[in-house]
Amino acid sequence: MPKRSYFQDIAGVLGSNVFTLLTNFGLVILLSRLLGTDGYGLYTALIVVPTLVVSFFQMGIRPTTVFLIGSGREDENNLVSAMLTILIFTSVLGVIFSAAAYALIGTKGYTPALLAMALTTIPMRLTTIYAGGVFLGKEEIPKANMMNWLTGLFTLLLAVAMVYFLKLGLFGAVASLLMGNTVVALLAISMLLRRFKTRLSVKNPLILKMLGTGVVYALSFLTIQFNYRIDVVLLKVLSVPREVGIYSLGVSVAEMLWQIPLAIGVVVMSRSANATDKNLLNQSTARLLRISLIAGIIISAAIVLFSPLLVPLIFGTEYLPSVRVMQTIMPGIIMIIAFRVLSGQLAGAGRPDAALKAFAPALLVNVVLNYLWIPGYGANGAVMATNVSYTLASVIYLFVFSRISGMPVKEIFRFGKEDWNFVKRFIDRKKKPESRIEH
């Protein structure tokens, strides 16, 4: 049983996510100001390829590791050894695949050094992601949190030095991203090697087992990430860098809403991998979803109201068109909150196929609508396509979750007095620790 309570874990992940959010927000302000709309658009379009490739070449190893460690069925030393062996192969394949993707979509505006640095971020990010799965499987959530906030902090500090002080522009922005990820990746590896007895070998029988389990996780996660980021790729192809910069800034700010459900989803995934009472887990997850939706609606209203004042003040008047992006995308962002919370339970229970069923048709709709609307409406066309895609995916996932969990949709959204007591206990941290799964 975990020594920390449900509330402590959620608060810890949320605190880590908020800190990471602030560092990322600082990075967005810094780069958007110093690079301008065109430069920021080039930066975003450059890093979106490694982001999408990492999504697939994770190969579902992180959630698979969480599931296998939580189940206690395998020797942990062999499991970590298999994971590190897989890391080497996925890193190499990820770099090769990304290089091919750059050749396909074009490299106009990028030097070989920029492309090389972007490619090198892939093994670094994969290392951090894989290591986080070990800590989540052990329910050592604070260590997994550290991987996130350290990366954001180092990247921001390096960007301040290289972009602001040294005036290295786009080169400095990409270099800071690479260096920040590299430092944390090396730290993660050292933590694993000190704790586990590892041996790299392609003959480890757990490799095929992890890949077999992870392939569905990988496909589902890739499909989800394509839904989140394919619009940036299509904007670069069908529009101009300025539109990419405007859209990327607006979406980056709007996606801040996801920090609360993301924190909850991480904890739910870790706990569900170790849970025995599924009924109590269902009730707790549904309660967390309802609370997240209320918080999301309140925060989204604030963004809609204050973005016209704050965007030109913080980012400059050239980003005023991003205000409309932030305001228009809010319905889709709120809809994804449901998926963010519910997916943690099914992923931890070894059911990644649920996300694939929801996001595969949504991705098809997203691509078609982007091709139809971007040429005429630019960034705003991408926003409209995103809203439709996010809504479709979330509604499908809600019904899939209901079927798998056995919990009716009406019950998932049934607010009760206990919801508010749950919030009160979350705020009142001085009371005695709660049970493993909150009633």
Image (spheres, rainbow, N blue to C red):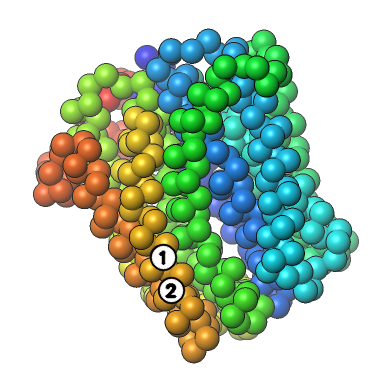
**Tag 1: Cα neighbours inside 10 Å, few (<14), some, or many (≥20)?**
few
Pointer 2 residue: 368
Residue at horizontal 46 percent and vertical 64 percent from the top: 254
Q: Position of residue 62 (x, y in %)?
A: 52, 33
Where disc 1 sits, the SS reads: helix
- Which one is in front, 182 or 130? 130
Residue at horizontal 44 percent and vertical 46 percent from the top: 220
Q: Could you tell me how far apart the alpha carbons at marks 2 and 1 are, in whole angstroms? A: 6 Å
- Which one is in front, 307 or 79? 79
**Residue 175 visible in the shown view:** no
Residue type, numbered disc 2: Val
Horizontal side of 305 relative to 164 (left or right) equals left
Identify the disc placed on residue 364. Answer: 1
Residue at horizontal 21 percent and vertical 50 percent from the top: 399
Residue at horizontal 68 percent and vertical 69 percent from the top: 105
**Residue 250 visible in the shown view:** yes
User: Image quadrant of residue 129?
Assistant: top right
Residue reaching furthest to the bottom: 376
The answer to whether the residues at label 2 and label 1 have Cβ atoms under 8 Å apart is yes
Q: Position of residue 357 (x, y in %)?
A: 33, 50
User: Image quadrant of residue 284?
Assistant: top left
Asked if 51 appears above or below 181 in the picture, the reply is: below
Horizontal side of 160 relative to 228 (left or right) equals right
User: Image quadrant of residue 159?
Assistant: bottom right
